[in-house]
Image (cartoon, rainbow, N blue to C red):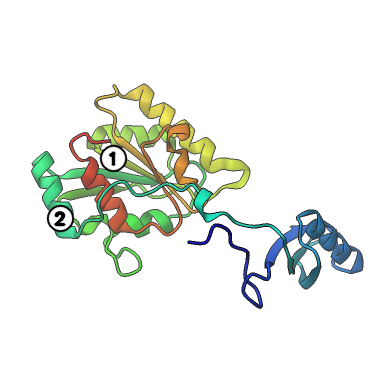
Amino acid sequence: MSDVVRPYGDTTGDGMVQVSFTLPLPAGRRGEGAALQLAGKMGIDPAMVVHARPIGDGHTFFVVYGRVNHLVEPGKVVVAERDFPLLSAKDVNAAIRGRLRRKFVVVGACIGTDAHTVGIDAILNVKGIAGEKGLEYYREMRVVNLGAQVTVADLVAAATAEQADAVLVSQVVTQRDAHLHNTRAMSAAFREAFAPARRPLLVAGGPRFDERMAGELGVDRIFGRGTTPREVASYLAHTAGGAR
């Protein structure tokens, strides 16, 4: 791997990038000038507005294309590496059966005002996503999908009633960091309601999460954009019986 790389646009290493943003300005020359000013402050020089479209009263969506001089150092990139094996459905079931000798209970929900169930349904429902079946497909798992807009109190109550081994929370709505606030509130509620040895595994997921923030948010694992049901199933099987 090269020590440094630059963005690619028209030719290798030319540093060309494309960014999009909205400004609270009406469409027109002044708005485009403001977009170019912002691009310059972002280090894009030269820059040109390649798209501008009004999106309501006094707001304009811009796409700007131009060159940056910044370099990327791949060797210094820090990511959350997968620290468990990726298992087949057969191996997931075998691991759970061998460690628990009963079904692994999963309770899932979208909490707060989040009504976007596509993510949690993709992981839990048997139809799954991208050719992978959801957790309902695994015969050694019992899945309880509470759906959308579930309060933290109701989630704790359901996890208690179902004797959940794991609680999966999906958060898609991220305005004003709602996903972070909701996850912290959920974590605090579970830690108050359960003794450490009896607390369910807490897993949060969504496209705007940083997978390295699990400890900061008080959960055991975070799954980000592009996570598949098989990854989640493998993680749960890996942790079955207390490994965290």
**Residue depicted at x 45% and y 45%:** 211
- The mark found on residue 36 in the picture is none
- Say which element carries label 2: helix
Q: Residue 22 in the image: x percent, y percent?
A: 74, 59
**Residue depicted at x 10% and y 46%:** 97
Q: Which residue is mark 2?
A: 91
Q: Which residue is mark 1?
A: 166
Q: Residue 33 in the image: x percent, y percent?
A: 88, 64
Q: Is residue 139 visible?
A: no
Question: Which numbered disc flags the more N-terminal residue, 2 or 1?
Answer: 2
Dot 1 surroundings within 10 Å: few (below 14), some, or many (20 or more)? many
> Could you tell me the amino acid type at mark 2?
Asp
Vertical arrangement, residue 244 with respect to residue 72, above or below: above
Vertical arrangement, residue 139 with respect to residue 105, above or below: below
Q: Residue 67 in the image: x percent, y percent?
A: 74, 66
**Is residue 22 found left or right of 127 in the rendered image?**
right
- For marks 2 and 1, give the CA distance: 19 Å
Vertical arrangement, residue 135 with respect to residue 7, above or below: above
**Residue depicted at x 50% and y 37%:** 182
- Say which element carries label 1: strand
Q: Quadrant of residue 194?
A: top left
**The one of 140 and 214 positioned closer to us in this rendering:** 214
Residue extending furthest toward the bottom: 10
Residue extending furthest toward the front: 3
Residue extending furthest toward the right: 30
Q: Is residue 164 visible?
A: yes
Q: Residue 183 in the image: x percent, y percent?
A: 47, 37
